[in-house]
Amino acid sequence: MNQKRFTSIRIIGIILALVGMFALGFGTANSMNGGWLGEQILAWHYGSGSSGNTANFSLFWNVWNDVHQKYAGKINDQQLVYGAISGMVNGLGDPYTVFMNPSDAKQFSQDIQGQFYGIGVEIGVQNSTLVVISPLDGSPAQKAGIKAGDTIVKINGQDVSNMTLDQAVAAIRGQKGTTVKLTILPKGASSTSDVSIVRGLIEVKSVNWSIKNGNIGYVRISQFSDDTVSLMQQALNSFKKQNVKGVILDLRDNPGGYLTGAQDVASMFISKGIVVSEKDKQGQVTSLFATGNVILPQTPLVVLVNGGSASAAEIVSGAIQDDKRGTLVGEKTFGKGSVQDVLDLVGGSSLKVTIAHWLTPKGHMIDKKGIEPDVIVPLSSADAAAGKDPQLDKAISILNGQK
C-alpha cells in the first residue's frame, strides 16, 4: 500500500544529517577523524535511541577508507552513499521499506500515476518467496498467462532467493520491446515453467464498469491510482441514474494504491463511521472516517475479492464487511496491511518507509492475515481456462435474491 503524504520534517532532518555526515567523511576519506566526527553526529541523534543500543559506525568508516585507498577502479561517491543508505534500509528486513535513488523514485511516481514500461505485474513477498499479487488488466503479463499466486523462481535465469523486492522489480522492468524470461511455479503446481514476456508501455485506466443481467451494475477497480476516485464517481452516478437493483464491486487482483483513494471509494458506499485505523510503532491508533460523500448508501452490494486483493483493496473490503454494508465473495485476500509513507529527499531520491499497520473498523489486523470473505467461492485454473467465473456468478445470484 503506497500512502502519499506531505514530507515529514522530522524524518527528513535525520536523513539530511546522515547525508551531511557522509559529506564530512568525503573530505577526510583517508583520515579516521572524519569517521570519528561522523560517529559523534550520529551519536548525537541516536545516542538515546528507542532501540536501546548505539551502533558502532567505525566499521562503516573503515570500509569507506579501505575502498578509497585500495579499490582499483573509478569511484562514484554519490553511488556509494546511495548504496549505503539502501543497505541500511534493507537491514530492516521489511520488503516494503525501500530507499529509492532519483531514477527509481521517478519510476515509482510514474507507476502510481498509471503509466510505465514493463510487463504489468504487481509482485510481493509472502512466506519469504517472491509471488505475483496480480497481473494488471490487459498487460503483457496477463496475456502471457501469469496469474495471482504464481511464484517467481528466476528472472532471466537468475535465482531470486537472494534478491530484494526492489532488485526483483528492477530486473523485471526494461525498455519497451525487450524480453524478460520468468521461471514460474504456478499456484498449486509442483513443477516450474519458463515464460518469456515482451515488455511494453503499460497504461492503466483503473476503473471500468458495465451493466450485467440488465439491471446489475458491475464496476472493477484494477488499482487505486490518480484517476480512481473520479472514475468511480462517474460509474456509481451512472448506476444511480439507471436505478440498478444492485452493485458488484470487483477488487480481485487489485494490488492497492493510494490510501485517500481507498477512503474515498469506501465512503461512496458507507455513510459514516471508521473506514480504517492505523496503529503506529508506539501503539497509538489513528482512525480515518467516511468522508460523507456517499453515492449509493443503500443499494445492495457484493464485493469480489481473492488472493490478489491487497492493501487499499483490503481496506475497502474490510470496511464494507465490518459495516455489514455488503457481502464479500471469493477467496481470502493477500494480507498486505502495512502503511508506507513516501518521503521526498534531496537530489530527487525518496524513502518509502513502513510507519504503521492497518486495522479494519472492528480492529482486525490485515497484515499477513488477510480478510476472509463472507461467502467462499474458489476460482480454479480450469474455470479460468474455460472462461467461467463462479465468483461473479455467485455475486449475481446473491443480488438476485438467490442462495
Image (cartoon, grey):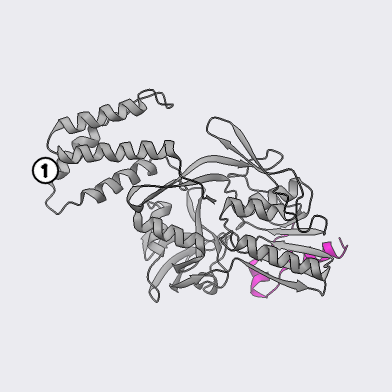
Above/below status of 128 relative to 120 = above
Q: 274 or 75: which is nearer to us?
A: 274
| Bounds of the magenta segment | 376-403
Q: Is residue 202 visible?
A: yes
Q: Is residue 390 visible?
A: no
Above/below status of 11 relative to 395 = above
x, y (%) of residue 47?
35, 24
Residue visible at 57% across and 30% down? 283
Q: Is residue 29 magenta?
A: no
> 10 Å neighbourhood of mark 1: few (<14), some, or many (≥20)?
few
Residue type at mark 1?
Gln
x, y (%) of residue 166?
41, 54
Q: 118 or 385: which is nearer to us?
A: 118
Q: Which residue is mark 1?
A: 69
User: In the visual, does 363 lie left or right of 355?
Assistant: right
Q: Quadrant of the C terminus?
A: bottom right
x, y (%) of residue 67?
16, 44
Above/below status of 47 relative to 167 = above
